[in-house]
Image (cartoon, helix red, strand yellow):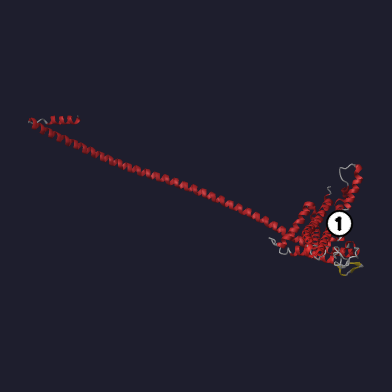
Amino acid sequence: MATEHGGGHGSEGGLGIDPMHQFEIQRLIKLDLFGVDASFTNSSLWMIIGVALITALTVWGMSGRALVPGRLQSVAELAYEFVANMVRENVGSAGQRYFPFIFTLFMFVLASNMLGMVPYSFTVTSHIVVTFALATVVFLGVTVIGFAKHGAGFLKFFVPSGVPVALLPLLVVIEVISYLTRPVSLSVRLFANMMAGHTMLKVFAGFVIGLGVIGGWAPLAFMVAFTGLELLVAFLQAYVFAILTCIYLNDALHMHH
Amino acid sequence: MPQLDFSSWPPQLIWLAISFVALYFLMARVALPRIANVLEQRRDRIASDLDEAARLKGESEDAIASYEAALAEARGKAHAIAAETRVKLNAALEAERAEVDKKIAARTAKAEARIAEVRTSAIGEIDAAAADTAAEIVKALIGGKPAKAEIAAAVKAARGA
């Protein structure tokens, strides 16, 4: 599957554009770490760019420490307040310890999604391995926090209260399965949204080229509108990822069902 | 589907770990404390500014109250001075009027005395003139001279009539 695309402007006929080409990993610098491939890829490049931009916004943008903030400082403060409110409302005061992690997660996903909207860029979050890794960190972290805080009592989380005893075994199984599928749903939601949106954009871009000057205007107009929608989705998916993390954290900390 | 090219997973995971951990430490150690600090400073500043405003408002209210009190006091004093002056002036006026009244009364009495004197002397002269005239008339009519006492009695009776 990975070998069949030979390049974006391949000669396979038709419209001549492979919409999946944009997701390909290209090794820019070949590196090897104890026999493991650790090459610096286009994905790595855009991760680093995202980290650099977030750091620039929150460190350099705040360097003035102005009482009345300028533009960059306002954006940085806005992001801070946004995530702080999210944590406060969904987790409460106990969640303050995990605020830096949620903030990092939100900003990283948001920056990756947004940078993916730049033409010729690479969308880090369009790869299931990246989103699944993030979701796994959240899932394992939340589970560890749950057991650390409640001990074996955390297992009661899987036992719904006020249910007939006869139904309990079935419900416990359902609860456990729903808990275990959390990282899957969390990661697939983000990855699928990013991949589908970018593929769609690429397909319609192909239509613009294919239909030429005469017929290409309709897909072009659609693309303009769809780009706006994709920007919304880019923000929304980062928000959903962060808020679900908050909700899972709240479950682990407070256990109310 | 490039996402399922498993050979691309290790470099992605390794660089995800590197960049995410780096970002986490940059945020947790540098960026977030700085933003929190700025926000807290702003909150403190706003709170202290509000306190200062409340303090100044209290001060101005005190100033207004003391001004009002001073004004009321001054007004009261002015009233008192006016009343006192009025009483003093009334007393002086009364005294002067009484004195003038007394003077007028004295003068009136003097004048009345003189009038009475003039009148009595005038009446005496009239009586004498009347008596003389009566004597002359009697002399011209009947000749002879009537007694002076008779004439005086007749004049007196005529005047009384």
**Residue nearest the observer in this picture, A110 or B33:** A110
Neighbour tally class for label 1: few under 14, some 14-19, many 20 plus, Cα within 10 Å: some
Where residue A21 appears, x then y in whole percent? 86, 65
Q: Quadrant of the N terminus of chain B?
A: bottom right
Place of residue A222 in the rendered image (x, y in percent of width and height, measured from the top left): 78, 59
Q: Residue furthest front?
A: A214
Q: Secondary structure at mark 1?
A: helix
Rendered location of residue B53, percent (x, y): 63, 54
Q: Horizontally, is B52 left or right of A155 in the view?
A: left
- Can you name the residue that lies furthest to the bottom here? A29
Asked whether residue B62 is in view, the answer is yes
Q: Which residue carries the number 1 mark? A: A188
The residue drawn where x is 40% and y is 44% is B90
**Residue plotted at (14% across, 33% down):** B131
Q: How many marks?
A: 1
Tell me which corner region of the image, top left, top right, bottom left or bottom right, holds residue A105: bottom right
Q: Chain of mark 1?
A: A
> Is B118 rendered above or below residue A52?
above
The amino acid type, in three-letter code, at marker 1 is Val
**Residue A144 visible (yes or no):** no
The one of B89 and A168 positioned closer to us in this rendering? A168
At 86% across and 50% down in the image, what residue appears? Answer: A150
Give coordinates of residue A82: x percent, y percent.
Answer: 75, 56
**A234 versus B114 height, above or below:** below
B51 lies left or right of A86 = left
What residue is shown at x 64% (from left), y 55% (from top)?
B52
Examine the image and state in which quarter residue A78 appears: bottom right
Quadrant the C terminus of chain B occupies: top left
